[in-house]
Amino acid sequence: MKYALVTGGSRGIGRAVCTRLAADGYTVIINYVNNEQEAQRTLELVREAGGDGELLRFDVSDAEQTAAAIDRWKDEHKGEYISVLVNNAGIRKDNLLPLMEEADWYRVIGTSLNGFYNVTKQVIQPMIRKKYGRVINMASVSGIIGLPGQTNYSASKGGIIAATKALAKEVAPKRVTVNAIAPGFIKTDMVEGLDEETLVKTIPAGRFGNPEEVAELVAFLASDKAAYITGECIAITGGLN
Ligand code: NAI
């Protein structure tokens, strides 16, 4: 059995990634934090796509909870390991820096950047031991070019891109690849409330992307075909950069 863990798999890009990986024959471990009903819906879609899956509840920003949940998974799946990890969970709490609450700075870093550390630390060792693995980190164009009102989010995503490059060099000899994806504006709950009409004018392709387009890139990076790509950050932005 090939196992793929997708954090924040209950909706949006995470859900599309779960469904796409299921079509490639993975048993998908769908992580969610609150909304069990939506996570169950992702599981149904995974099954409809011809794969199978299971739900694993933990908050990626909580190191102890994350370690306990993944340890439990390991205990229940002796002899198996997670060969694909998609660090997708993320939040945004936008504000101009002088107005940004300290809690919102730490919450965003805590989910995106600390979440990367908390989950990857639990999953990378078996990949190294088995000499095969794929880690795919959901960054953002905001972490490359910076976007106003997003110093916390840009910092967390820029940090993920740097961490991707460093970890890729650590584990490349063990045939484990680590890459980041930097989406632009993708139609999910995350962009709800943004002024789409104005924003699309800044996008050369003239539209927002959709989660399935991001999921295709994840599936490629997760595949054997991408064995020689590591330490990269690939933008998927319709030309916005
Ligand atoms: P979304 O808000 O629909 O999904 C985010 C997912 O992360 C949700 O399932 C949520 O429950 C989960 N999540 C949040 N905090 C969590 C925690 N502490 N523990 C576990 N799960 C948690 O947003 P979307 O768009 O699907 O975002 C997915 C990733 O893509 C995020 O990392 C986001 O920053 C990134 N991204 C999205 C873009 C967009 O335009 N939609 C653009 C660039 C990056």
Image (spheres, rainbow, N blue to C red):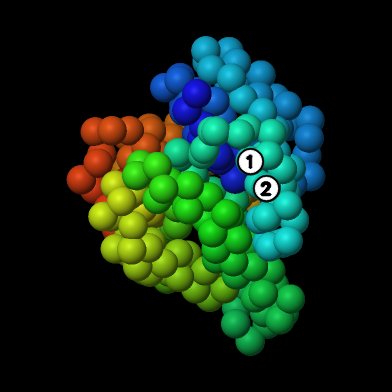
114 on left or right of 136? right
From this viewpoint, is residue 212 visible? yes
188 on left or right of 67? left
Tag 1 secondary structure: helix
Give the tally of numbered discs: 2
| Label 2–label 1 contact, CB within 8 A | yes
Picture coordinates of residue 54 (x, y %)?
A: 66, 28
Question: Which residue shows up at 56% across the image and 40% down it?
Answer: 6
Question: Which residue shows up at 53% across the image and 50% down it?
Answer: 123
Would you identify the image quadrant in which residue 144 lies?
bottom left
Residue farthest to the bottom, as pictured: 98
Say which amino acid is labelled 1: Lys
Residue topped by disc 2? 71
Tag 2 secondary structure: helix
Residue farthest to the left, as pictured: 228
Picture coordinates of residue 201 (x, y %)?
A: 39, 52
Would you identify the image quadrant in which residue 221 lies?
top left
- The vertical placement of 89 against 150, above or below, is above
Question: Which residue shows up at 64% across the image and 68% down it?
Answer: 110
From this viewpoint, is residue 200 visible? no
Say which amino acid is labelled 2: Asp
Question: Which residue shows up at 53% across the image and 75% down it?
Answer: 151
Picture coordinates of residue 226 (x, y %)?
A: 25, 39
Residue topped by disc 1? 74
